[in-house]
Amino acid sequence: MIPNLEKTALYVRPGATDMRKQINGLSIIIENELHIDPFSSSLFLFCNKQKKILKILWWDRNGFFLLQKRLERDRFPWPSGEGEAQQITSDQLSLLLDGIDFWKAHKTLDFHTVR
């Protein structure tokens, strides 16, 4: 079964992840560092230091899926630092996979008075 991305939570782990980690190592990161249940049917995204390898971990009823994409030339736009997991939308996932850095997009301004 493929998840309905419109109804699935998508989490990005900022910073670099050791891509030698497989399902067990990544699920430990999700549980111990991100403090999220790895069995929650959410998608968890990880990227390496060079920003050329992306892994996605997802629990589906009775087992984990581990997907990997390796770029041959470009780099993934990825948040740096070791902050908390950032939740993104399915549209943002598409932008990320296309190489568009939505983290640096214009932010909505909220003014209360006119000068």
Image: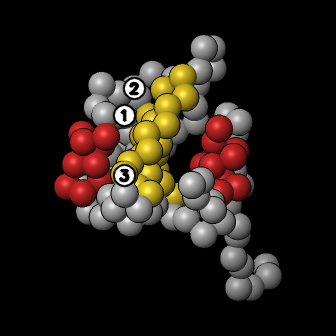
Q: Of residues 82 and 30, which is closer to you in this image?
A: 30
Picture coordinates of residue 96, whole percent (x, y): 63, 42
Q: Amino acid at mark 1?
A: Ala
Q: Which mark is residue 16?
A: 1
Element marked by disc 2:
loop
Please tell me which residue is depicted at 28% across the width and 31% down the height of the picture: 21
User: In the picture shown, does residue 29 fall above or below 11?
Assistant: above
Q: Amino acid at mark 3?
A: Gly
Distance from label 2 to label 1 (Cα)?
Answer: 5 Å
Q: Which mark is residue 49?
A: 2
Closer to the chain start, of discs 2 and 1, is 1
Q: Which mark is residue 63?
A: 3
Q: Residue furthest bottom?
A: 112
Callout 3: few (<14), some (14-19), or many (20+) C-alpha neighbours within 10 Å?
A: few
Q: Amino acid at mark 2?
A: Lys
Callout 2: few (<14), some (14-19), or many (20+) C-alpha neighbours within 10 Å?
A: few
Label 2–label 1 contact, CB within 8 A: yes
Distance from label 1 to label 3 (Cα)?
Answer: 25 Å
Element marked by disc 3:
strand
Callout 1: few (<14), some (14-19), or many (20+) C-alpha neighbours within 10 Å?
A: some
Can residue 70 be seen in this snapshot? Answer: yes
Can residue 87 be seen in this snapshot? Answer: no
Picture coordinates of residue 66, whole percent (x, y): 43, 39
User: In the picture shown, does residue 55 fall above or below 84?
Assistant: above
Picture coordinates of residue 29, whole percent (x, y): 25, 48
